[in-house]
Amino acid sequence: MAQFQRPTLCCCRKVLTVPSKSCEGGQGLGQCRLVDIASASNFHCFKLRHFHLDLRLNFAVKEITGWQVLELVAIQPGVQTLVLDIHPSLLIHSIDCKVPGTTGAQDISPSLTYRVDPFTDYGSSLNISLPASVIRLHRAFQITVRYTTTDGPAIWWLDAELTCGQTRPLVFTQGHSVCNRSFFPCFDTPAVKSTYTATVRVPEGVTVLMSASRSAYSKQDRVFQFSMEYPVPAYLVALVAGDLQHVDIGPRSRVWAEPCILTCAVSKLGGSVERWLNVAEDLFGPYVWGRYDIVFLPPSFPIVAMENPCLTFIISSILESREFLLIDVIHEIAHGWFGNAVTNATWEEMWLSEGLATYAQRRITTEAYGEAFTCLETVFRLDALHRQMRLLGDNNPVSKLQVKFEPGINPSSLMNLFTYEKGFCFVSYLSQLCGNVKRFDSFLRAYIEQFKFSSVVAQDLLDFFLGFFPELKESCVAQREGLEFERWLNGCGPPLCEPDLSAGGVLTGPVQSLCDLWASEPPDPEAIANFNLSSWSTFQTVLFLDRLLDRSPLSHEVMGQLSRCYSAQLDEMNAEVRIRWLQIVVRNSFYPDLPRIRGFLHKHTSRMYTVPLYEDLCSGVMKCFAAEVFYQTQARLHPNLRRTLQQILFQTSALPTTTSVPSLLHPTPSSPSPTPGGQPGPADPPTTGTIALRDVNVSA
Ligand SMILES: [Zn+2]
């Protein structure tokens, strides 16, 4: 059994690792450094059994005040210091320590000495001196930290104007990847899991939800209580509070949203969620979290969706794009098994969560909607992967599944399509090796059963795979020339092979035919008229538009023809379709359709739609137009997004999007705005010449 254990020093003695058989001098398959957490120096000295949060939310001053009780056991002798991850936005008031169930003076230490040291631009180190009289090997003790936290990277306060209803403020947290150190002191690594409970006090009329398996509300005291009875890593602790109401949509599911969008949200999902859960359970075994609820958040939510256990967070902007909503919710459901139940032990191997969840999502859609639909969605995403590859070049380390970053790197910068799609291709390759997709389903069921509620490294998955299929181990599939597991994990560049997607031909074929017609000189209007976009699915239309965008610049004549054929029709479609047409308009400087861009940017205030359009507008000749629209709409943008757009607008050089690539090997400069977890890295640091978000857009 290769279940995750406490990390130890790597055999090269230089870096902390999670144990793995192949960790040889820090170079092996399972070598995993923990350079992103201040607590790396000592978290292996303790077992975190549980923690409790007692919080009061103050919307008027945008503060969370309260205390946290950590229940710990020293598992190494002679431990004198406890190091936790925090953030400069989190102010410590006092720390004390006691042994639970005792009252003797020797078992209580009312005021501990502590020190806060700088660590990186995304966190600090809280060093607590432990009293020798209290700390004994294998004896439980409690540390109570009283603190106040304001508006750090994890905590997003929305004034009423930024909510859907525009009548009451709202606050939500977003922990992925390393943001929750600004929410509560923690071992901010996916390697450490524990249960938690919380008590949250709020003003009247505010509803609080957390990523917890149980909740209760005392109306008299206006206190919400939560309990997560299954162990989770720090980044999966999440809270949202505001004017939220719910409707039950299944035996274990409810939709939460602000009242003004609740009916719409329920109508889009009612009946489907329980069906998807059932399909997933048939494939991967029981859903272990009890509830599966969904909360729709205002457009300021910085990513598309987040797989917080028991309570998926999802952006309300996606409601109008039915197929994207479907894919995003199914993807978050898949995380219930892959990512949440079994978690990547370090952020350097995020593909273990995202690649497997993407594979699982596609198994679910294949069962629920057929192979053709799933292949179409996969083609669309692999197209995006190859687009990203062209921008990055073949040797960019961002394209490795197993990234090794230096101290100071913010793991959020790892969010890219490789994590998802190259990871998916590797998992598909493993599935192909065992010869039968159903056999691979049973392997995944066994993998979840073996590792659930723990954190793993790639070596654990691969060892278990080869153990499950001994005939594959005997035939040395891990060393098959050109397709070595090691090369999959540590090689730069595109996937070594991609799954057969020919079953999608019935849907992708017409898309390619229409693209080819538009590429011929001159385009034949009669042949083109045979294709009716309104009969296509959203994924067909976005695939068509993405492929047209790839062929830009287009001639002015072709743009005029395209606009006459499609512009009005596309304007009636959903935002995922419209933004793609508008990007074609911008990249080809097609002025007649500028009013449509203005209309779109006045309506859509989410990061996922504004950033790519502003990047395109500012890298071309439409910067003045962009500035004008920005000034008209800025009051309705979240301050973090406003700062990002200002950076795009006021950067001095407007370089084409191919000139700069994100680097994982060097820290990014401090960002003036909090880095939203799960957001692709290039979005928040200064965006000079970075890749358009549309090209790397991912849902967490
Ligand atoms: Zn995901």
Image (cartoon, rainbow, N blue to C red):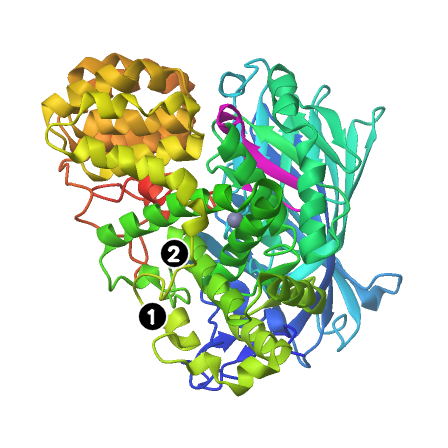
Q: Quadrant of residue 337?
A: bottom right
Tell me residue 290's x, y (percent): 77, 46
As rendered, which of 493 and 92 lies closer to the eye?
A: 493
Tell me residue 31's x, y (percent): 47, 76
Q: Is residue 311 within the magenta segment?
A: yes
At numbered mark 1, what does the secondary structure look like: helix, strand or loop? loop
As rendered, which of 226 and 118 lies closer to the eye?
A: 226
Cβ at disc 1 under 8 Å from ligand 1: no
Find disc 2 in the rendering and name its residue.
418
Amino acid type, residue under disc 1 in the picture: Gly
Find disc 1 in the rendering and name its residue.
491
Amino acid type, residue under disc 2 in the picture: Phe
Look at 11% across and 22% down and name the residue there.
557
Give left or right: position of 486 versus 292: left
As rendered, which of 583 and 598 lies closer to the eye?
A: 583
Using a 10 Å C-alpha cutoff, classify the residue at mark 1 as few (fewer than 14 neighbours), some (14 to 19) or many (20 or more). Answer: many
Give left or right: position of 591 versus 386: left
Mark 1 vs 2: CB contact within 8 A: no
155 in relation to 80, above or below: above
Cβ at disc 2 under 8 Å from ligand 1: no
